[in-house]
Amino acid sequence: MQHALFAPEKPAVPDIFAGLNPVQRLAVETLEGPLLVLAGAGTGKTRVLTSRLANILLAGQAEPHQILAVTFTNKAAREMQARVARLIGQPTEGWYLGTFHSLAARILRKHAERVGLKTNFTILDTDDQVRLIKQILEAENVDTKRTPARMVLAVIERWKDRGMGPEKVPAEDAAQNGRFLNFYRIYQDRLKALNACDFGDLLLHNLTLLQNHPDLLQEYQNRFRYVLVDEYQDTNLAQYLWLRLLMLGLDGAARNICCVGDEDQSIYGWRGAEIGNILRFERDFPGARVVRLEENYRSTGHILGAASGLIAHNRDRLGKTLWTASDPGGKIRVQALWDGESEARFVGDEIESLQRKGMGLSSIAVLVRAGFQTREFEERFLSIGLPYRVVGGPRFYERQEIRDALAYLRLIAVPEDDLAFERVINLPRRGVGTASLQIIHQRARADRVPLVEALRRILGESGFPPRLRTALQGFMMHYDRWRGQIGQMSHADLAETVLEESGYAAMWQAQKTPDAAGRLENLKELINAMSEFDTLQGFLEHISLVMEAHEDESAEKASLMTLHAAKGLEFDVVFLPGWEEEIFPSRRTLEENGVRGLEEERRLAYVGLTRARKKAVISHAANRFVHGSWTHAVPSRFVDELPSEHIEKDVEPGLFNARPRGGAFGRGALDSPVSSFGDFHHPPRPRVTLEGKARRVEEKEPVRHYRHGARVFHQKFGYGSVTAVDGDKLEIAFEHAGAKKVMAAFVIPAEEAAEDFPA
């Protein structure tokens, strides 16, 4: 027998209470009954969650398999499990930790036969769901152009998020969406026949199991002695019902459930999140205790003061005020600028200034309300050679809808662009399948002509079945008219005509998915971008240069993203542009959701401010170029709601009394009147492009010739030196954007640009 003196030492267990402030410790030590932890931004929520889990295990209150811990991402679940294992000094095997969907799937696998499925059921992804619904619609003789499959899926998902099977859809809903309810019934029957379910079914079937089978309900209520839920403010109704079933005993008494969340960061109402779940926690779980985490460890005092003052205007909240023991820091800067271009230039200059002072680009973020707003910032960053990444989505010109629209424009400008033809010929759908495209390719090779000309010849010989032939004849009729309108109408107007007459814009308008509206906004922003150029060819050449830009993936980069994508992230410096009415708060959100929508927009502003550790800069423009015309922009109501003691306002010099300057690069007056608000009547300065100057110069005098070494200026890429000359094609080493190939007509001598564009 081994003497105790020589027994192996147990690994030291960290003190789980070390470093916790008194309120955090209270949340960790409260183990009995329902508990709501209102965790403000940057208040140590994750540490409280993991420490509480560790305390339950170390105190012997439960075994790992008796704990149900719910997160919103698998990554968060893995990180939580690893942190708890480190805290308790041993692995935590067998417990129920994961997302709502993964945990519901785990339970459903064990009892699938009780809802008419086999245990090896398949979980369909979105593409499979859309394909299945499309089959149903076609079988029901429904026109899928007027009633797209994605629209039907969006309605079904909304019902499932509310915990409603076809039999539970309210009569009022059924009366308004009778056809959709019928599709829902058929869809559910088809899923069962396929031994499949979608993500919404995972929770929906769980609700059926727990509501219809008391033995299973009691089994899981007995199994889970503790339930912990992260990001409770983001739960939908189905998730809420699932938790209530597990956590309310047969006698109505609340069990050991701990929900952690922040009603002030509930920003996902558009995808089914129900803020009421967290607001009524105390009513739902009698005897609940509420602990407020208000000491912030992330941001400075002025940032927190401004954020707290702003969110205090919301009515739907439980109430808390963030504070910090750290330095108050600098006040939030609110910068008023002339227009969107000035705003992008201002942000770019500020970032470069911070970089010169030694701040890493990865510590800086630009947070916009909507994806279409990234375009001007991307172009500015490219022109000055500022490395950046778009977080949560592709760059503006790499987005699907933008590439589709550009393909149409490329084909109109250059009929030989076969790649563009292949991209658009069946977009929107015209019935052109692989076999039809192959026929067009064969004819093109045989006659040695572009695909668009091969199609014309096939149609001239009565090729293709009648229905397809009619669709393609319509396409060619539009195409020829579009080609003929080059030079007859502005290229921005032409682009808008193409998107409408091709049916491409209507395709996105018909889709009721959450991202459809954003795609339409991006298309409108594309037309705005085109208005900066005098010719279609000049715009397409610019796009080619932008798309050509490659950067070192390992290099430091500033982050550019939407406010929604920024949730959970933090940066030393945050820029918040576009704080104007109709942009932020979003006009569409206000029109669709009224006061409820306004409060969610305000929460989004709060989230944006609290991403900043050291510095936050808000900006708004006096003018915006929207849908092809200038309009005066009104500062967001959120700017006025910021407490004056925490902000300092800065206005671009001469913003409200300046007159347009003359000169080649000056800004002339608009030809058309501008809508005005209040006493502001000064017309905004229209964007004058270098391409426009080059074209006008060319009309009066020959295009300049440049020698090797000549200093030149390009409006998008800035200053540079000519390194090679091939006729009117130049190779230029730009100071910030690197080596580029450009036409001589698109640059001017550096000395001519110096007055308007200081180096």
Image (spheres, helix red, strand yellow):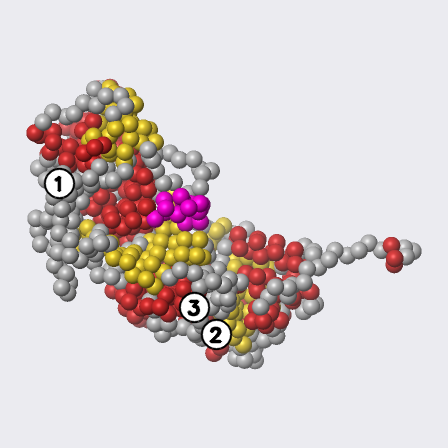
Task: Count numbered badges in the picture.
Answer: 3
Which of label 3 and label 1 is nearer to you?
1
Q: Nearer the viewer, residue 620 or 130?
A: 620
Q: Residues within 10 Å of mark 2 (few under 14, many from 20)?
A: some
Residue linked to disc 2: 281
* Identity, as a three-letter code, of the amino acid under mark 2: Phe
* Identity, as a three-letter code, of the amino acid under mark 1: Gly
Type of secondary structure dominating the magenta stretch:
helix
Image quadrant holding the N terminus, namely bottom right
Residue 360 within the magenta-colored segment of the rendering: yes
Residue linked to disc 3: 263
Q: Determine contact: label 2, label 3, CB under 8 Å.
A: no
- Inspect this view and state whether residue 49 appears: yes
Name the N-terminal-most of marks 3 and 1. Answer: 3
Find residue 447 and report its horizontal and vertical position in percent: 21, 19
Find residue 251 and report its horizontal and vertical position in percent: 56, 80
Q: Residue at 60% x, 69% y: name it.
A: 25
Residue 34 within the magenta-colored segment of the rendering: no
In this picture, residue 122 sits left or right of residue 656: right
Find residue 56 and report its horizontal and vertical position in percent: 65, 67
Q: Which mark is residue 663?
A: 1
Q: Is residue 599 above or below residue 377?
A: below
Q: Residues within 10 Å of mark 1 (few under 14, many from 20)?
A: few
| Residue 34 sits in quarter | bottom right
Q: Is residue 615 above or below residue 725?
A: below
Find residue 404 and report its horizontal and vertical position in percent: 27, 40
Q: Nearer the viewer, residue 439 or 462?
A: 439
What span is in magenta? Answer: 350-364
Q: Secondary structure at mark 2?
A: helix
In this picture, residue 351 sits left or right of residue 232: left
Q: Marks 3 and 1, how far apart in space?
A: 54 Å
